[in-house]
Image: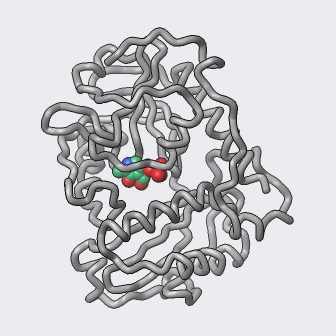
Amino acid sequence: MRSLSRGALASTLLPVRATRYNTRAMSSREGRPSTAQQAGPATATPAPLACIDGVLTPLAEARIPVSDEGLVRGDGVFEVIRLYDGVPFALERHLARLANSAAGLRLPLDIEAVRADIERILAEPNPGGALLRLIVTRGGRRIAMLEALPVLGESVALASVTYSPTRVLDGVKSLSYAANMLASRLARERGFDEALLVSPHRRVLECPTASFFAVEAGAIVTPPLSERILDSITRALVLELADVDEQPITVDELESIDEAFIASSVAEVMPVRRIDERELPAPGPLTLGLATALRARIAAVTAG
Ligand SMILES: Cc1ncc(COP(=O)(O)O)c(C=O)c1O
């Protein structure tokens, strides 16, 4: 890992830009009072609601055929979008990735129909702080559903778990997530919160549902996409907000890092307090600065 000497955080972080990603779903909510300052953990429980092929239904009654290859073979694509006071953050980026994943999987996708599903489900009573999960299956089902935000801790302890990305799925956020879920389970069996996926060649990749960043001597580093990690939307935002080196990180190099954090749509920027036996300050100063900058970005975009 390069040990670049960087200036203080203030010079590391670029100005926060209030770019609008979400268009229709967001503008339909512009009349609502702003709770932008609430960006961050929220506790509202959304109405259990799903939209299957354009039809709204209570979640408990939502059905698809069991023969759908989305279920039988994990053949399909998905996205998880965080809602802030009912407003989806980075919606256009998520839709673009969904379309890209579907193209990669040779899966027919009507993105305008997905957009209409989202408008339909978000037109119902405000789900508050929640998650919107989108799924498109090989059987041709379009599913949108609201989920409660998981309880998010203040920091995470990561256990390294050996993992080999499936090359043919590069760039595809597919429904085949059993390996990721197993890695999390293995980490929890060892008393950790989450897995840190490392390649058989001992290179750090990402977490099962988040990207990974380390800080050493003032330099923020994250593995490059060429390590076959997901093109995470939050990772891309962190790269816009700060000066980050995209370069391979070996497990051995984790011995000399000063701080680390994970990033995802659900967890935003989350400090890492431990990696295997190594304790880390959580949050470290650069992590704290980035968490604050990302939250400000989210607040600016979702405020309407
Ligand atoms: C493997 C993996 N890496 C990273 C992420 C974070 O991606 P995003 O920032 O787009 O939520 C996810 C999200 O589910 C993921 O599954």
- Compare residues 253 and 145 and report the one nearer the observer: 253
Q: Quadrant of residue 20?
A: bottom right
Residue 195 visible in this rendered orientation of the protein = no
Residue 266 visible in this rendered orientation of the protein = yes
The N terminus is located in which quarter? Answer: top left
- Compare residues 7 and 282 and report the one nearer the observer: 7
Q: Is residue 59 above or below residue 239?
A: below
Seen at 48% across and 46% down, the residue is: 264
Furthest-top residue in this view: 5
115 on left or right of 36: left
- Compare residues 271 and 216 and report the one nearer the observer: 216
State how the image is colored.
one colour
Q: Position of residue 68 (x, y in %)?
A: 29, 85
Q: Position of residue 12 (x, y in %)?
A: 58, 21
Q: Position of residue 153 (x, y in %)?
A: 51, 41
Q: Position of residue 75 (x, y in %)?
A: 27, 73
Seen at 34% across and 36% down, the residue is: 224
The C terminus is located in which quarter? Answer: bottom right
Q: Is residue 1 above or below residue 165?
A: above
- Compare residues 226 and 119 and report the one nearer the observer: 226
68 on left or right of 126: left
Q: Quadrant of residue 21?
A: bottom right
Q: Quadrant of residue 32?
A: bottom right
Q: Is residue 27 above or below residue 136?
A: above
Q: Is residue 164 above or below residue 176?
A: above
